[in-house]
Image (cartoon, rainbow, N blue to C red):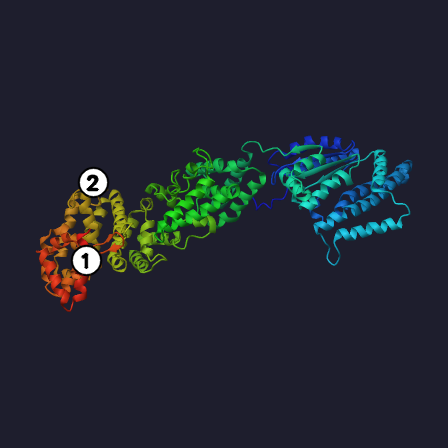
Amino acid sequence: MAKELDSDRAVEVSDNDEFGFVGIAEKLAPRVVEASKGDGMVIGLEGRWGSGKTSLVNFLRSELKGAEAEHIHTITVAPWLNGDTASLVNSVLEPIADVLHLIENEAATPEQQAGAEIAENVGQIRELISTYGSQTARKLAPVATLAGYALPGMQAAGEVLGAAAALMDNMAERPLTPTALKAEIIEKIRALDVGFVVILDDLDRLEPAQAVEVVRLVRSVADFPKVAYLMCYDRDVLADALSEGLKVKDGDLFLQKIVQLTFAIPLPEPFDLRTQFRQEVLKLYKELQGIDLAGDALEDLESAVDQEGQGLATPREVKLALNGIRFTYPSVKDDVYFPDFCRLHLIKTTHFKFYKWLESYLSVRSIIVSGDGRVGADEKKRCGKELKALLPSQKPDSARSIWHASNFVPGIEARQPAKDTVFAATPQYKDEEFVSLKRLGSPFHYRFYFALTGPKTIMSDADIDEALHLSREDVPGLIESLAGYAKTTRQSGRTWFEHILDRLEDRVIGELDEEQLSGMVTGICEVMDTVLEIDNVPRFFAPSLGRLAGRVVGECLRRLNGMNPERHHKLALWIAAECSSINWIVGGLLRTELFHHGHVGNGDQRTSPEEWVFSEDLLQELLDIARKRISDQELQGQILAMPDVSGFMYGWRDISGEDEPKAWVTQVTIDDEVFLQFLQEMRGYAVSDRVYYPLHQQTLEIFFEDADAVVDRVESLVESEHAAEARNIRDAIKQGEGF
């Protein structure tokens, strides 16, 4: 990768300094050195978690090495790694004693005989510090015991330490008190030309009891001259820990008693965090995709970083977002839109609750779009209220506003009431853009952003691509494949064939070449009667399957006509004369075109010539072919076995007029059983308090010479061997009067 996963370790090499910490350390180090030459000073280096405190400390430590020439020694302690008070005391005092031991040895060498007095002085200080540490550890032991820290196989560490200190008291004839020891140590240290900088890092990781003892240690245990303490912590976190550990209302006030001055980690310069994030993700994209991100995608990325990147507050948050992208993007780079992927990881890092809301909302919306489920008013209300709470701003340019989020989350609007905020209808062009670019808002791709795999109710892009490949290279194979999809149902009971029709949106069709357009039209048309036989149930709140197919075929034919009119004409003639799905051709494709040309209906479905699938002249040519084909006696003998008899009969009526269908009905319905069967096939459907399948008076008038005679005949059959069927039809006729 352009950069490996970042373990979030503090920066130690100046070349990796991305936020100016080296410059801060260079200016801060001399002031810390001066503080170590006085009577003792406690400096608070404050910054929130992830702000770079430890990185700054690393650079500061490097700068302080130069101060060793001035006999200023740096000691680093991580109290949160020490399990008890004894080790905490020793971790501060023993390094001081070790430094003094080195000074003692240097002063005792032959070349340094004149320093014998210094060596004696240092030796005394070392002994005093050792005794002082034991005395102090005994004093603090009860607190450590209360904190609950224990060593394996032993009593609580505080108890052990207290016993050890008591034993030392018994061995000494007249042990000095801690106060006396401290006074003697102070007196002797003042006489030495040596100072210490004690760095106490990560104090905000301590448990409350530990936090209390650390600050007490700094103030009371090791409060020596020529010692400067640099305490590193998140002020709010440490103050809360002190409040809990001391059982006081305001831990910050107690902290002020300990710390004489503070230096706060400065905020990164404006846009530094976003700039670093942008640079790193662009490197990653180029490495994985082999090209630079450019054009609209680059603009979308910059917009995402500028908006969602406003929430970045610390270098650590940048690392978290980058690590999430580096870790997962290589696995889904062909299934997601890179700018949206980066946007989502910024949201995950800076606004995690909104991230979880997005995952839930997009999953539900995907099921709605695929037709595998619905959402009720209560669920809409709950979802909308949550969104309003998460994005309360009313300013369109705010990253915390619904206005802004609607640019990448489909179906959300800043409206009242709450239920109208979510799952709103979206323009077709917007949905097509989401799908074609594989954006976060695509119902077919959203899950790759969260789970690295596609939704179970959605066909993979690989399968869709295979269908498009077959449309160019193997049309018989496409027909077989589509027929198989028509026989395979999803969880909702709908077929995968219907899903393919949904995926073939105008934008996808717009990218097909001539061969693919022709092949797709041929494949869909050939399987439509098979499809209707398997799945011809009414779609009460959505277009019928036949209409969905008509949309796809129509768009393919219109585009083919623009590319190659001759091929379009040839394919249209084949559809009318040879396509095996005569039921759908007559009752669906051609009948719809008649409405669009304004030849049937009341004209409200007439469209502009630019939207016609066939020109007026070509349509008339196709109708002549269809009339001749319908007049075939063998075909008419198969009408009652068709999957959509009603659709075919109305199509026949619109293509040839009422006389031919009426004559055929009169002939075939002489037999009572066929009569009732035909009436059953001609029932419509309606939704009120439940689903009804009425038989309308108008239908009887269109296809029978005498509608009243039909009603009388049905009534006469109620007492016949066909009683059940007759009563069913009689009820349907009565229902038709009410709709």
- In the picture shown, does residue 546 fall above or below 41? below
Please state if 224 lies on the left or on the right of 360 as rendered: right
Going from N to C along the chain, the mark reached first, 2 or 1, is 2
Q: Residue 732 carries which label?
A: 1
Direction bottom: furthest residue: 721
Is disc 1 surrounded by few (<14), some (14 to 19) or many (20+) residues within 10 Å?
many
Residue 679 in picture, x, y percent from top left: 16, 59
Residue at the image point whose x is 82% and y is 49% from the top = 165
Residue 288 in picture, x, y percent from top left: 49, 46
How far apart are the two marked residues, 2 and 1, measured between alpha carbons?
Answer: 40 Å
Query: What residue type is disc 2 on?
Result: Pro
Identify residue for label 2: 609
Please state if 646 lies on the left or on the right of 46 as rendered: left
Q: Mark 2 touching mark 1, by CB under 8 A?
A: no
- Residue placed most toward the observer, 263 or 194: 263
- Residue placed most toward the observer, 364 or 18: 364
Residue 421 in picture, x, y percent from top left: 39, 41
Query: What residue type is disc 1 on?
Result: Ala
Please state if 206 lies on the left or on the right of 636 as rendered: right
Is disc 2 surrounded by few (<14), some (14 to 19) or many (20+) residues within 10 Å?
few
Residue at the image point whose x is 44% and y is 46% from the top = 336
Number of callouts: 2
Q: Which mark is residue 172?
A: none
